[in-house]
Amino acid sequence: MDRQGSVTALRRVVASYVKEYLPTAKRWCVALSGGPDSLALTAVAAAMLPTTALIVDHGLQTGSAEIAVTAHSQALGLGCVDAQVLSVEVSGDGGLEAAARAARYRALEDARKDQPVLLAHTLDDQAETVLLGLGRGSGARSIAGMRPFDPPWCRPLLGVRRNVTHAACAELGLTAWQDPHNTDRRFTRTRLRHEVLPLLEDVLGGGVAEALARTATALREETDFIDALVEEALTATVTADGLDARALAELPDPIRRGVIRSWLLAEGAVGLTDDQIRRVDTLVTAWRGQGGVAVGSKLRGQRLFAGREGDVLRLRPEPI
C-alpha cells in the first residue's frame, strides 16, 4: 500500500467497523501504549468521535512513566478529549506476559466508564495468536483467535497488516515508542514474530499471516454456533449444587465439554486448559469413583476443585 494512503485506508477500515458494530456509539476509549499500532488507531479514532485515551503503565521497564507521559501528550495532541495514565502492578501466575495482560485488561475495564474500548490488534497479532494456540494444543476456541467485537473490547484493525499502521504514523509525522519487549527473544510471541512466521512465509511462499487470520475467522463462526448450543444446554443441566452429570452424559461431546467449560468459568475458574476440561469430562463419561480435578481460581491463595458426588458435579475452593 502506498504510504500516503495509509491514514485514509485506516479511516475507511474504522468507519466500516463502526457501521457494523458500533452504529450508536457517541464516544469511546482507545487503549494507547504509545506504539505505532495504537498510536495510529488513536489518531483515526480521535478524528471520528470524542475519544479518551487509556494508557496503561505496567512499570516493567526503566522509564515506563516517561513513556506513559509522552503517550498522554501525544493523545491530547491528536485531539483526544481526555487521556489517563493507569498505573498497574503486574503479578500472578502464568508468566510475565499473561500477568501483564490480565493487569492491563483489569485497568481498562475499571477506567472505561461503560464506554467501548478500541484495541489496536492487527492481522499480524491475530496470526501470532493462532500459532500460539496451535502450538499449545489449546483447542478450536484458542485457534479461533481474537474476536473483532467482544464487548466492551473492539478490534477494528484485525484485518490490517502491521506495516500499514507503521506507515500511517510516518505519514502523520508521529514518533512511536518501540517496545523493547517486541524484540526480546525471551518472549514466545516475539520469537513467533521474528523467527517462526518469517520462516513459514519463506517455506510456503507468502500469505501465511492472511491464511492464519482466515482460519481464525472460519473457526470462530463454528465456535459461535456451538456456543449458542452450549448456552442452551447449560441452562438445562445446571442445578443449585452444580451440574447434573446424568443429563450431561446425554449431550454430544463438544457440547458437553463446552457446558463444563462455561460452568467452570462462571464459578470463578481461570487459566483453563483443554486438558483440564477433558479431565473434568471424564467425571461424566468414565466415572469410576476417581478423584476430582484442580483448576485455577480468580481469587488469590486458592484453587478450585471439580469433583463428582453422586450424580452432581460440584466445585469447591481449596487453599493453596
Image (spheres, grey):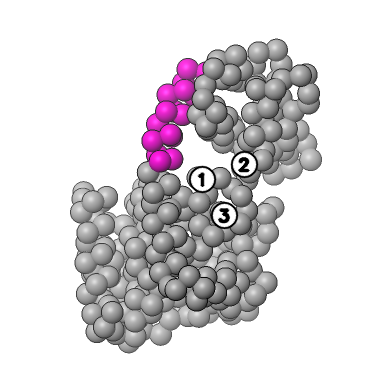
The three-letter code of the residue at mark 3 reads Leu
The three-letter code of the residue at mark 1 reads Ala
Check disc 2: other Cα within 10 Å, few if <14, some if 14-19, many if 20+.
some
- In the rendered structure, find residue 140 and report the number of the disc placed on it: 1
- What kind of secondary structure does the magenta stretch mostly adopt? helix
Whether residue 228 is in magenta: the answer is yes
The three-letter code of the residue at mark 2 reads Asp
Whether residue 133 is in magenta: the answer is no
Q: Nearer the viewer, residue 74 or 283?
A: 283
Above or below 237: residue 203? below
> How far across and how far down the image is residue 150, in percent?
39, 48
Q: Nearer the viewer, residue 234 or 176?
A: 234
Please state the extent of the stretch shown in magenta in the rendering: 222-238
* Cα–Cα gap, marks 2 and 3: 12 Å
- In the rendered structure, find residue 274 and report the number of the disc placed on it: 2
Mark 1 or mark 3, which is nearer the start of the sequence?
3
